[in-house]
Image (cartoon, rainbow, N blue to C red):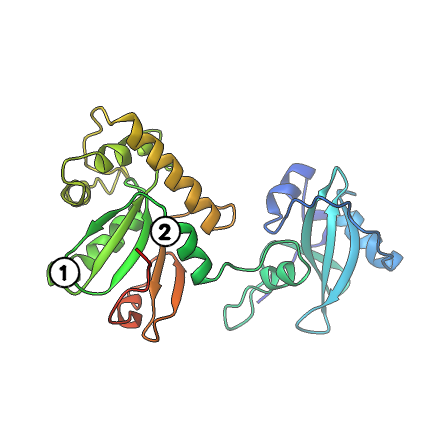
C-alpha cells in the first residue's frame, strides 16, 4: 500500500525533506545534468519547495509510479530517491512491495547512490583482525558485533544461551561501544577482564532491560582495551558500509559459504553449517 498526501502538504521545510531522504551518498564527482520533463520537474519542485533538483527518472513497479533520482539544491553531492505517484504526489522515504522488498533501496543501488551490499566473504575479511571474546566451547561458530548496552543483542543472547551451554554453539563476540556514553568503557572493562567470556555473560545476566544497560561494572578499563573497542567499532562501520548497528552477525551456512545478517533471527541457528569458515 502507498500512502500519499497532496504535494503542498508533503513537507513543510527543507530540514524535514533532508531528514526524509533515506538513501543518500556522498559523490566525489559533480552530479551529471539530465534533462527532465518540465511538468515532472515542476511537481517535484512544488512538493519539495525547490529543495530537490531532478537529475533523471526510472521506471517504477507500476505505471502510476516513477522513480525520481535527484539531488538537494543546497548540496549537490547529497543524492536522493523519491517517487512520483499518479503524476500528482511525491513520496519521500522507503517504498516496499508486497513481498517486503525495499524498492527505494534497490533503485538507489542500481543508480549508484549507495554501494552494493557487502558480501559475507568481504565482511569476514574485515572482521578478522578484531579483538574478540570466544563464548562457548564447541559447536558451529558465529561472529557477533555487540554493544554491551544493546537490548537487541541481549534478547539474542537469551535466545542462544541454551545452545551455548549445551555445546552446540560458539559465539565470537566482537565488543563495540556506541549506544550509551558508558558503552565504550563497559565494553573495554569486559574485554580487559581476567576471563572476558565470563565477564560478557555476567553483563548479560545483570542486564537492565528497562534502562537498556549492561550489568557489568565499568571500573577502570585498560587504555589498550579502550583502543581495541574503538577499533572494533570502526570495523563494524566498515562492515555495515558507514552505518553502526548491532547485532551484526557473520556465519557460515550449511554449504560452508560465509554470510552476513543484520539483526537477530532465531532461524539463523537452523542455517548454520557444522563448522565455522572464519579464518583464524
Q: In this view, does 45 lie above or below 84?
A: above
Quadrant for the C terminus in the image: bottom left
Which is more N-terminal, label 2 or label 1?
Answer: 2
The residue that mark 2 highlights is 128
Q: In the displayed orientation, state which residue is furthest to the bottom.
A: 255
Question: Which quadrant of the figure has residue 256?
Answer: bottom left
Counting from the top left corner in percent of width and height, residue 12 is at 68, 41
- Neighbourhood count class around disc 2 (C-alpha, 10 Å): few under 14, some 14–19, many 20 upward: some
Counting from the top left corner in percent of width and height, residue 209 is at 24, 43
Residue 244 in view of the camera: no
Residue 153 in view of the camera: yes
Using the image as rendered, state which of residue 147 and residue 92 is in the foreground. Answer: 147
CB of mark 1 within 8 Å of CB of mark 2? no
Counting from the top left corner in percent of width and height, residue 247 is at 35, 51
In the image, what residue occupies the spot 29% across and 40% down?
149
In the image, what residue occupies the spot 69% across and 38% down?
14
Counting from the top left corner in percent of width and height, residue 109 is at 62, 60
In the image, what residue occupies the spot 69% across and 48% down?
79
The residue that mark 1 highlights is 162
In the image, what residue occupies the spot 28% across and 64% down?
276
Question: Which quadrant of the figure has residue 34?
Answer: bottom right
In screen coordinates, is 233 left or right of 144? Answer: right
In screen coordinates, is 1 left or right of 219? Answer: right
- Neighbourhood count class around disc 1 (C-alpha, 10 Å): few under 14, some 14–19, many 20 upward: few
Using the image as rendered, state which of residue 247 and residue 131 is in the foreground. Answer: 131
Amino acid at each position: 500500500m502507498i500512502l500519499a498526501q497532496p504535494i503542498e502538504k508533503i513537507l513543510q521545510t527543507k530540514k524535514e525533506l533532508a531528514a526524509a531522504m533515506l538513501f543518500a551518498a556522498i559523490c566525489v564527482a559533480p552530479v551529471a545534468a539530465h534533462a527532465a520533463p518540465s511538468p515532472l520537474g515542476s511537481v517535484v519542485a512544488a512538493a519539495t519547495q525547490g529543495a530537490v533538483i531532478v537529475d533523471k527518472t526510472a521506471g517504477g513497479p507500476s505505471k502510476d509510479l516513477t522513480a525520481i533520482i535527484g539531488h538537494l539544491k543546497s548540496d549537490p553531492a547529497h543524492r536522493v530517491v523519491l517517487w512520483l505517484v499518479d503524476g500528482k504526489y511525491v513520496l519521500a522515504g522507503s517504498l516496499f512491495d508486497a513481498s517486503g522488498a525495499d524498492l527505494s533501496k534497490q533503485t538507489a543501488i542500481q543508480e549508484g547512490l549507495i554501494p552494493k551490499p557487502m558480501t559475507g566473504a568481504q565482511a569476514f575479511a574485515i572482521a578478522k583482525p578484531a579483538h574478540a571474546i570466544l563464548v562457548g566451547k564447541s559447536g558451529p561458530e558465529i561472529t557477533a558485533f555487540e554493544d554491551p548496552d544493546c537490548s537487541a543483542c541481549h534478547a539474542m543472547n537469551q535466545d542462544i544461551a541454551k545452545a551455548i551451554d549445551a555445546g552446540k554453539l560458539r559465539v565470537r563476540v566482537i565488543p563495540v561501544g556506541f549506544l550509551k556514553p558508558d558503552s565504550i568503557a563497559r565494553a573495554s572493562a569486559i574485554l580487559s577482564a581476567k576471563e572476558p567470556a565470563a565477564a560478557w555473560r555476567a553483563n548479560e545476566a545483570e542486564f537492565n532491560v528497562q534502562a537498556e544497560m549492561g550489568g557489568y561494572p565499568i571500573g577502570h578499563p585498560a587504555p589498550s582495551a579502550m583502543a581495541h573497542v574503538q577499533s572494533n567499532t570502526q570495523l563494524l562501520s566498515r562492515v555495515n558500509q558507514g552505518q553502526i548497528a548491532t547485532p551484526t552477525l557473520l556465519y557460515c551456512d550449511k554449504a560452508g559459504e560465509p554470510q552476513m545478517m543484520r539483526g537477530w533471527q532465531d532461524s539463523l541457528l537452523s542455517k548454520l553449517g557444522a563448522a565455522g569458515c572464519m579464518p583464524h
